Image (tube, rainbow, N blue to C red):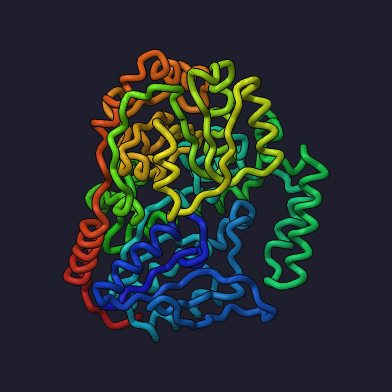
Amino acid sequence: MKVLFVSYDHPFTGHSGVSVYSRDLFQALVEREIVVDAMYIHHRGWRGVPTVRVSQERGITLLAVTNSPLHPETSLYHPEQDIHQASLARLLRSCLEARRPDVLHVQTLQGFPGSLLSTARELAIPTVVMLHDFWAICPRMLLMRTHGESCDGPDGGRNCVQFCVQPRSIRQKIFEFGMRLRNGRLKKAFLTARSVYVRTNPRPGSLWAPRRSPTLVPGSPRLLEQHGRRAAALLQASANADRLIAVSEFVKSVFVRHGIPPERITTLTPVPEVSDRLVRRTRETPVGPIRFGFLGRAVPVKGAHVFAEAARGIPRDKARFLIFGGATPETRRFLQELSGETHLEFRGPYTRDTLQTVLDEVDVVVVPSVVQETVGLVTLEAQAAGAPVIASRIGAIPEFVRDGEDGLLFRPGDPADLKEKLLRLIEAPWLVATLSAHTRPPMAMAEHVRRVLDIYSECQRHTERRTPV
C-alpha cells in the first residue's frame, strides 16, 4: 500500500502537534512496509511559480511544495484563496497522477486549496481527512477571536469580519512580507531585525501586552460573502472525503454542528509515541511541598499567565511551581511579576528524550489552556506517566480528565478557581495518590496504527474506481 500524506509543516523539523504525530505515524507505517510519501509546504524560492522538490529522508519520499501562493497568515484578508488556486491546483493534480497513491491522507489543508480533495475524488483516490483543528471553518484555526474570546464559527462570515478582520498596521504588513522571503541571508537578517524590535519595543511586539477591548469592525460586504463561501466550500470538500477522522469527540461535535453528517466522522485520538516509552509510576502522597508542573510553550493561549497568577501567595514550604518549556526573558519577568513573592522555577526547554525525567520531577501537571484544545497531548503524556492533571474545562480536555477521579477541572482563564484546586491538593495531599491511581494511559501506538490501517482498507473497499474527469 502507498499512502500520500498532506500537511503544512515539514514532518521531521516542524514543531506543531500535527508534525510530531505525523513522524510517529510515518515510522510505524514504514515498519509495516507501507510506502509513505509526504507533501508539505516548503519555504519560498526565487521562482514565481509553484514547484515540487522531491527528496528521500528516513525511508519516506518528501514532496516539498515551493512557492505556494497560499499564505495562511493572509487567509483572513483573502479567504477565497483557500478554495481554489489555478496554478497550485494543476501542480497538485500532476503530483497525484504521478504518485498515484492508494490512499490520500490529509492531515491539514492549511496552505493547500480545498479543491485538492475534489481532484482526488475525480481521480478515484480514496481520501482520508484528519480533523486536527478547525481550519475548514476558521482561518485562524483555533475558533478563537483576535481578542481572545472563543468563537462558535463563521456564521456565514459575519463573525470573521466583525471580530477577526482588523485593519493591518504597517508592522504587520512588513512582518508578512518578511516571512515570505526565501530562507537565506536576507531572511536571517529580517528575523534578527524583528527580534531586536520586539526586545526594544515590548508593548507593540509583546505576547503579553494587554488586549484592547473587542472592537466590532463592520467589514466589507465583499469579505463577508467571501468568508461565507470559504467555509461552505471547505466544509463541502471535507464532507466529500471517503472518511473523516476527528481527534476528539469535541472536534466531531463542532463539525457536526456545522453540517457534516455524524456517520461520516470516526473519532480516533492521536497517540504520542513517547507515551509507549514512559514508565508509569503511581504518585505517592507528597511528604514535602507539592510540585506543580507546567509543560509546554509559555504563551498566552496555553495559559502560562493563569498558572503564574494562581500561584501567587502560596507559601514555598507548601508548593513548588515548575515551568518546563521555552520562555523568553520578557516572559519570565512577566510571569514572575504575576506570581509575586511565590517563586517560579523556570527549567528551560525539554525534549521527548528528557520527558520522562521532567514528569518524574512533578507530582501534578497543570494544563491551564484558554484556547479550545482539540486534544491536549501534554495531558495524555502526563497520564501515561501516572501523573494527575489539573486542567481547564475547555474544548476536548474534559474527555481525558475526569473531574475528581483522575484529575481536577477548573474554569478556563480563572486563576482564582485554579488556585482553589491547588489549595485543595495542598490541604489534602493524599488526593494526589488517589487521583494518580485512577489515571488511564492512552491507547498504545500499535493499536492506533491498526485502527488507521483499518480505516484505509475500508476507504479502499468503498471507493468506486472511476475514469478521471
Q: Position of residue 22 (x, y in %)?
A: 39, 62
Residue 130 falls in image quadrant: bottom left
244 relative to 307 in the view: left or right:
left
Horizontal and vertical percent position of residue 61: 42, 79
Quadrant for the N terminus in the image: bottom left
- The number of discs equals 0
- The quadrant in which the C terminus is found is bottom left
**Foreground residue among 184 and 77:** 184
The residue positioned 54% from the left and 20% from the top of the image is: 316
Please, which residue is most extreme toward the top here? 427
Residue 94 visible at all: yes
User: Where residue 288 appears, x then y in whole percent?
Assistant: 43, 22
| In the rendered image, the vertical position of residue 68 relative to residue 216, given as above or below | below
Q: Is residue 114 above or below residue 56?
A: above
Image position of 82 with respect to 407: above or below: below
Q: Nearer the viewer, residue 77 or 201?
A: 201
Q: Measured from the top left, where is residue 112 in percent x and y?
A: 50, 66
Q: Is residue 17 above or below residue 367?
A: below
